Image (cartoon, rainbow, N blue to C red):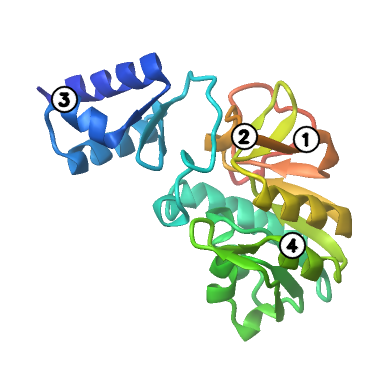
Amino acid sequence: MMAEERLSRIEQMTNEKGYVSTRDLAGALQVSEPTIRSDCKELEKQGRVIRVHGGAKSRRTRGILTQSSEKDMDDRQGHEQAEKDALCRYAASLVQDDDCIFIDGGTTFATILDHLKGKRVRVVTHSQIILNSFTSENGELFMIGGNYSPQYKMNLGPAALADLDSFNFQYAFLSCAGVDIDRRKAYTAELETAEVKKKAMKLAEKSFLIIDSSKQKIKGFYSFADLDEFDGIITDRTDQEVPDHFIIPEEN
């Protein structure tokens, strides 16, 4: 089977079933799982499927993204990274010296600290990704405690919420699993990360949702906020007229 024929079959199977595992695709097409992963990466690059942990999801599906179907942080690292970096650059440009900000977990914010260097800021986070990349050039860091989640690389649970309640922020920069522009909802794949996001929004003067375009039209298990609750949704592009509250930085 030629490569393009294989790509078409993978797209067809995901559209028919909504989600197909890497193992099932490899068995059906009689190729190795690494080949399927490579094919799915190419299909996602072309905008034909959505890669998730253990397989691929149709872009047409009405299915719900859950914790078991969401990709781990290690799998997401590097995905849409150029777009995410541009969004981080814009978000960092809003921050002034002496601001206190909350930075959410997730690979979306992998490079935001690079764009905050030289600013005197206080950063509050529950994200190991932020902790690992923080330096003295970024000001001060306050790491929230809680139960550590290896899947999400962040601290969660009641202790995290209690720690967070001690702070106030000029800005909360948040990520999510997906948004439904028509219903104007922001989603997570489970509850614990959502509770931290909701708490941070209450403690912030302004809240911004940062999403690359791959997360648009993805419904998650749990809706944690209406899009109108954010002061802005910063994204790289949309496939329709720019909705209310959406900000597309000029460099994109």
Which class describes the residues within 10 Å of circle 1: few (<14), some (14-19), or many (20+)? Answer: many
Which class describes the residues within 10 Å of circle 3: few (<14), some (14-19), or many (20+)? Answer: few
Q: In front: mark 3 or mark 2? A: 2
Q: In front: mark 4 or mark 2? A: 4
Q: Mark 3 or mark 2, which has the lower sequence index?
A: 3
Which class describes the residues within 10 Å of circle 4: few (<14), some (14-19), or many (20+)? Answer: some
Asked if one can make out residue 245 in the rendered structure from this viewpoint, the answer is no
Per the image, label 4 sits on a secondary structure element best described as helix
Q: In front: mark 1 or mark 4? A: 4
Of the 4 image quadrants, the one containing the C terminus is top right
Residue at image mark 1: 227
Of the 4 image quadrants, the one containing the N terminus is top left
Kind of residue at badge 1: Leu
Residue 119 percent across, percent down from the top left: 73, 76
Q: In the shown orientation, is residue 218 left or right of residue 22? A: right
Q: Is residue 206 above or below residue 115?
A: above
Tell me the CA gap for discs 1 and 3.
41 Å
Q: Mark 1 or mark 4, which has the lower sequence index?
A: 4
Tell me the CA gap for discs 4 and 2.
20 Å
Kind of residue at badge 4: Pro
Q: Residue at x 47, y 41 (%)?
A: 68
Tell me the CA gap for discs 1 and 2.
16 Å
Residue at image mark 4: 158
Residue closest to the eye, 28 or 108: 28
Per the image, label 1 sits on a secondary structure element best described as helix
Q: Which mark is residue 221?
A: 2
Residue at image mark 3: 29
